[in-house]
Amino acid sequence: MSRRSVALCLLAVMALVLALIPWEISSDRLRSAVARQIRNEFGLELGMQGRATLVFLPVPRLKIQGVTLADEAGAFSAVGQFNGDLRLLSFLTARVRFSDVRIVRARIQVALDGAGRNAWTAGLDRLRERLTGGDPGPSRVDRIIVTDSELALVHPGDGQVTEWRRLNATIRWPEAGGDVDLSASGLWKGELVSVALSGLTPSLLLGGASDRLDIRATSRLGRVNLLGSVTLGPTPHYAGLLAIQTPSLGSLARWTGLGLDLQDLDQPAGLSGDARLDSAGVEWPKAVLDLGRDRLDGSLAYRVDGERPKLRATLAGGDLDLGWVMPVANPTRATAPRGDYDVRLSASGMRMGDLRLGDLAAGILVSGERLEVSVARATLAGGSVKGRLSAALDGEGRDMRGQVSIDKVDLESLLSKTAPGRGISGTIGGQATFEALGESQADLSRHLRGRVMLVARDGEISGIALNEAAKRVDVRRAAGATPDWRGGRTRFGEAQLHLNFADGVAEITDGRVQTITTQTRVRGRISLSDGALALQATTRLVDPPATERPFLVLDVRGPIEKPVVSSRAPEDVTGATDIRH
């Protein structure tokens, strides 16, 4: 190899090394040129406290430590490291033009200023003037990359801060009149969230036209998809598909802070349909709501433009499990719901614990500290039921009032689902009214007042043979000797039960069971706080012979789930029954 070739190789190696070595730049002219392009491009003022270095390979790149970016109103600020890839042609002609901009390990803060202008207003105005000026020309910056940074959103009024940590984002905008694509990921409230936006054309939006919007946001706790059109202007809004899915509605509510009244409902949920979204809330005129295994169709609206969030919904479904309603509609809950609700439900069937209703038309209304639950129509065990329950949380606790009426309900079918093994049949109807005041569920039980009137017809009581036992009563038997009343069945034509509630105790003022040959009267009390029974039933023949038959007396005492029934000698009963304790 000739000396000339060796010299050329050495020069090439030296040039390559020099191109790879970062060169520190202290030129005020260069700093002014960089600040000018940032100002023209984004409407932000650039401050440089750290050193600036320049490398030539693989592309000319300017790196500045300790950069601050801020708008004139002080609503936007960023502190971190700035890297910019220079356009080669501009660099060769001694001009500063960036193709890519990178913000590294920065703290970015966005807020509203005192005049209500957000941090992007000035930049959008400048961009609108440039894009609508006739020939937008090529965009000076093709790509903006944010790496390992933090984004703090300061809300107006209360000054609360929403933070995104470990933020990584890329914004691609090769041409000023073309589309913008965005991909970002970061930690929000401890969960990793990924967001992707594609196909948005800023020149259309800033020119006053609508544009297509495609956004997908995913996390471990949920997924949101938007595919429709967006319009800027005095009232920016979105119209199109809005779909939300989550593996746990309760976890999603606790994470986002929205719908906290459902934070204990840990089951999958999904909501999708064409919607309209603006700063005040979202509305689905026609939507599909999947909750657990249930599907409901109807309309929903969720507004956040007042002191409390408001949910309005009209939903219909098939056989539904409405256990999720209780966190909102439970009148004994310790605190009032956090939001206002106006929900109308209709279903061919409803399940709530052991309760089963059909052909349901119901409503839930929550306004401030007032709660109202109504059942306008429902079928229950072959009959019908309707009722209304209202509650208010005032200074002395929760004030609850309600009324319920049933008609032609099959008693055997009802008890087989709610209290199996009771062995009572017939059709029952009646009504109940009640009210209570207290600070807890126990207080409400202790202070419950009301009245219940029930009538059952053409039924049968299993396990008790009152008719046969009454016929075998022998007046000559010694005291305490009573006929065997266990086993068999007692058919009755009509049974009545009147109860008065007072201070958590239900007193049977008139209880009767009428058969062809006997009449049984029931008196006693039921404690609602502990479920204890203290009842007495006396049976006699309707048409006794000349020698009057004595009573057959049964005492029922103990817990309502497993009461103890015993007989008493007829001679021990005189006059009115009194079992107070």
Image (spheres, rainbow, N blue to C red):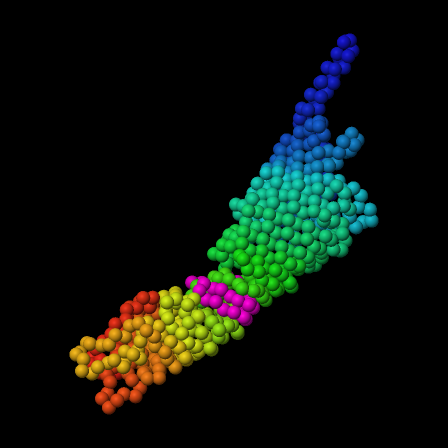
Residue 502 pos. (x, y %): 35, 75
Which residue lies at the image location 56% right of the left edge and 44% below the top edge?
A: 192
Instruction: Name the magenta segment's main secondary structure.
Output: strand
Image label count: 0
Which residue lies at the image location 66% right of the left edge and 34% below the top edge?
A: 83
Which of these two is toward me, 390 or 137?
A: 390
Q: Is residue 358 inside the magenta stretch?
A: yes
Give the position of the N terminus as an image quadrant: top right
Which of these two is toward me, 446 or 499?
A: 499
Image check: 451 left or right of 153? left
Residue 522 found in image quarter: bottom left
Residue 348 visible (yes or no)? yes
Residue 512 pos. (x, y %): 34, 81
Residue 46 visible (yes or no)? no
Residue 442 pos. (x, y %): 36, 66
Residue at the right extreme? 134
Which residue lies at the image location 67% right of the left edge and 24% below the top edge?
A: 21
Q: Is residue 210 inside the magenta stretch?
A: no
Instruction: Identify the magenta region.
Output: 334-363
Image check: 210 left or right of 292? right
Give the position of the C terminus as an image quadrant: bottom left
Residue 409 pos. (x, y %): 46, 75
Image check: 29 left or right of 539? right
Q: In this view, does 425 lie above or below 247?
A: below
Which of these two is toward me, 563 or 437?
A: 563
Which residue lies at the image location 62% right of the left edge and 55% below the top edge?
A: 243
Residue 537 found in image quarter: bottom left
